Image (cartoon, rainbow, N blue to C red):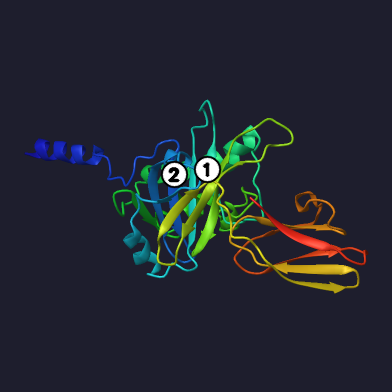
């Protein structure tokens, strides 16, 4: 009997712990976080579900459990940060990382190979693999809920990104932009490659995620035409004209000008900008000593 019990004990000890996901290279990870709360983390599956969407099309993001999120943060997700991130293997023939950006005024660039591996691959890969390494208890079929200050904190998004707790919104200072969208929000999704070119190429914009305060999460591929902006007012003081105009979330706004309208408006030179669109009125200024000037506001993308 003693030998039988010993054998059973050994079998139980060797059995693998339950896992919420089996992380694979190029999986998209969805993270919900807010200071003072658990990080709620999902593996959505291969990132191709976003990269293969036809430009202009909108899909509902599936593969995650809204009830787990609202049980953690409450039914109103206002103020909760949302991140989507993924990366290929560092040995892949075509290496890439995918990362959201909540900063519409910044256009990311590709990184040096060493920077790509240190700043993106190592962090994103750790978010996907550490929960299993540290045997974090599962919170659902594809989810972990991890207290960054708890016993499994080393496996949490917060601790992986920034053990000191500094600059978590900028991936611990490893990203040149804010990687979080703060609900309710529309925030971009970028593909970033390692590159030896100089200057570095601009990263590839893939589209926008949108999350509502109630937790509805969608992805729209490509650049979607924004509503036309309207110049609300022009105020002039001491040779400086301040142009105030409407914006919509996402994209950058630039001020172009001409002293006469003899040339096509599309060819007017840029005199100020950019400023990011956020759905509110924004202003750009132009210093011009001419007695009169004409202004046009353009948006990219």
Identify whether 198 is placed above or below 155. above
Q: Quadrant of residue 17?
A: top left
Q: In this view, does 245 lie above or below 205?
A: below
Residue in the image at 47% along x and 42% along y:
54
- The one nearer the camera, 12 or 273, is 273
* Camera sees residue 280: yes
Q: Mark 2 points at which residue?
A: 28
Residue in front for this viewpoint, 96 or 127: 96
Disc assigned to residue 98: 1
Residues at badges 1 and 2 in contact (C-beta under 8 Å)? yes
Q: Kindly give the residue lying farthest to the top in the view shown.
A: 93
- Measuring from the top left, give residue 87's x and y in whole percent: 50, 39
Residue ranking furthest to the left:
1
| Quadrant including the N terminus | top left
**Residue at the front extreme of this rendering:** 262
At horizontal 73% and vertical 69% (from top left) the residue drawn is 244
Q: Is residue 280 left or right of residue 216?
A: right
Q: How far apart are marks 1 and 2 (CA)?
A: 8 Å
Residue 3: horizontal and vertical position, in percent? Answer: 11, 35
Q: Is mark 1 on a helix, strand or loop?
A: strand
Q: Give the x, y percent position of residue 6.
A: 15, 38
The answer to which of marks 1 and 2 sits earlier in the sequence is 2
Which residue is rendered at x = 44% and y = 44% of the image?
A: 28
Residue 6 in the figure: left or right of residue 163: left
Q: Is residue 180 visible?
A: no
Specify few, some or many for label 2: CA neighbours under 10 Å numbering under 14, 14-19, or 20 or more: many
Q: Is residue 219 left or right of residue 227?
A: left
Q: Where is residue 277 in the image (x, y as percent from the top left)?
A: 63, 61
In the drawing, what numbered circle is on residue 200?
Answer: none
> In the rendered image, which quarter is residue 249 located in?
bottom right
Mark 1 residue crowding within 10 angstroms, few (<14) / some (14–19) / many (20+) = many
Say what secondary structure mark 2 lies in. Answer: strand
């Amino acid at each position: 009997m003693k030998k039988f019990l010993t054998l059973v004990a050994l079998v139980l000890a060797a059995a693998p712990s339950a896992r919420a996901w089996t992380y694979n290279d190029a999986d998209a990870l969805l993270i919900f976080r807010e200071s003072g709360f658990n990080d709620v983390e999902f593996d959505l599956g291969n990132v191709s579900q976003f990269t293969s969407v036809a430009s202009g099309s909108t899909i509902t993001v599936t593969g995650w459990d809204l009830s787990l999120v609202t049980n953690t943060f409450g039914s109103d997700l206002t103020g909760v940060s949302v991140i989507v991130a993924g990366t290929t293997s560092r040995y892949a023939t075509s290496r890439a990382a995918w990362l959201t950006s909540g900063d519409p005024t910044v256009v990311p660039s590709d990184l040096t190979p060493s920077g790509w591996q240190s700043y993106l691959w190592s962090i994103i890969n750790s978010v996907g693999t550490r929960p299993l390494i540290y045997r974090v208890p599962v919170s659902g079929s594809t989810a972990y809920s991890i207290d960054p200050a708890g016993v499994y904190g080393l496996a949490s998004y917060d601790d992986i990104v920034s053990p000191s707790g500094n600059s978590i919104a900028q991936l611990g200072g490893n990203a040149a932009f804010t990687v979080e969208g703060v609900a309710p929000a529309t925030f971009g999704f970028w593909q970033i490659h390692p590159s030896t070119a100089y200057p570095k190429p601009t990263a590839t914009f893939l589209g926008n995620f949108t999350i509502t305060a109630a937790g509805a999460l969608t992805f729209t591929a490509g650049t979607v035409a924004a509503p036309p902006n309207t110049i609300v007012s022009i105020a002039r003081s001491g040779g400086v004209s301040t142009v105030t105009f409407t914006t919509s979330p996402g994209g950058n706004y630039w001020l172009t000008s001409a002293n006469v309208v003899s040339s096509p408006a599309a060819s007017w030179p840029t005199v100020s900008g950019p400023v990011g669109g956020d759905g509110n009125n924004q202003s750009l200024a132009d210093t011009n000593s001419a007695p009169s000037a004409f202004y046009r506001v353009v948006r990219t993308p």
